[in-house]
Amino acid sequence: MEPNGILIYGELNEDLNVHNVVLELLTKARELKTKIWNQRIMVCIIGKRMNYEPIIQELGNHGANDVVLITDDRLAEYNNNYYGEIFTQIAKKYPPRIILIGATNQGKEIASYTATKLETGLTADCTNLDIGENNLLLSTRPTFGGQLTADILCKTFPQMATVQANTFKATTCENYVNAIFNWIDIDKIENHIEIINKIKKSQNAKDINTAQVIVCGGAGACKDNGFTLIYQLAQKLNGAVAGTREAFEKGYITKSQQIGQTGKTVAPKLYIAVGISGANQHLAGIKNSDKIIAINNDKNAPIFEHADVGIVGDLFKVLPDLIDNIDK
């Protein structure tokens, strides 16, 4: 069968709602399909038996033409073996031209498993997607530690790419969606994974993926009590703390808090950049922020060209004033 259409892995959150990255990928897929003869968009959902009607409608409202569902109570818990094999079988049954998957922890596992089984290429952690020469998927991703970006054409089918959450903005559209229920014999899947116990790691820090307010520290904050002040300001604003690559390498933040081409892409309502110069690698990670406030002692810092509000000053003087006056 000739490859046709765009297949998206329909990841669900722990609360069994559609992961927002799926809706973002659907929005981008609607754009891509207009450049390759209006091919259909299919989303594959894997999970336990339940009412999927609200999920189907939500996916349809964001551009899915078909939603294929594989449900079984044994799929209530995510299992790389089961989910990876099932998604691969769907990709074989409905051979797509393009496969798009969110670059979540789960999505990265599914993508690598599927690409290996289908013997095709995979471009990971893309920052943009387009249709290039010969109607091939053109995937843009950071390279050389985020110093440059590379445009990659995948010449094997299906063409696969993973994209981080918040890279694209999810939008709705008028659309009719078709539900397809598939049955796959799970007993025939060779399973090498047994879930013995699940322990949820406690996290005091807010998740920068979903935070509405983010206070981010750069090189200028990587000394003295710079990040202590950043945490205090974030707490006052009920926000999350993040940092640049340098902040991560110097141990001020964890990898999950890093923003930029080699970190995460975020889309908060308010983003406060503290001691950040504004290199392109970092700007790529904050492009979807609603409002940006920049604090830097260099009036010529590039970050000010992208900020809604710029404060030229010493962060070690500015932040204490902000912290003291927020509740006043």
Image: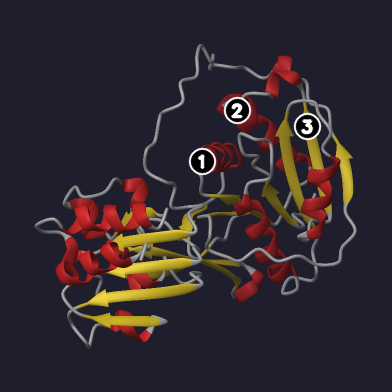
Gap in angstroms between the C-alphas marked 3 and 2:
13 Å
Label 1 close to label 3 by CB (< 8 Å):
no
Earlier sequence position, callout 3 versus callout 2: 3
Residue 158 at least partly seen: no
Q: Quadrant of residue 302?
A: bottom left
The residue that mark 1 highlights is: 112
Quarter assignment of residue 299 = bottom left
Q: Residue at x 21, y 50 (%)?
A: 252
Front label number (3 vs 2): 2
Q: In the rendered view, would you say 126 is above or below 188?
A: below
Give the amino acid at mark 3. Ile
Numbered tag placed on residue 78 in the rendering? 2
Which amino acid, by three-letter code, is at mark 2?
Answer: Tyr
> Dot 3 corresponds to which residue?
70
Question: Which mark is drawn over residue 3?
Answer: none
Is 312 or 127 nearer to us in this picture?
312
Helix, strand or loop at label 1? It is helix
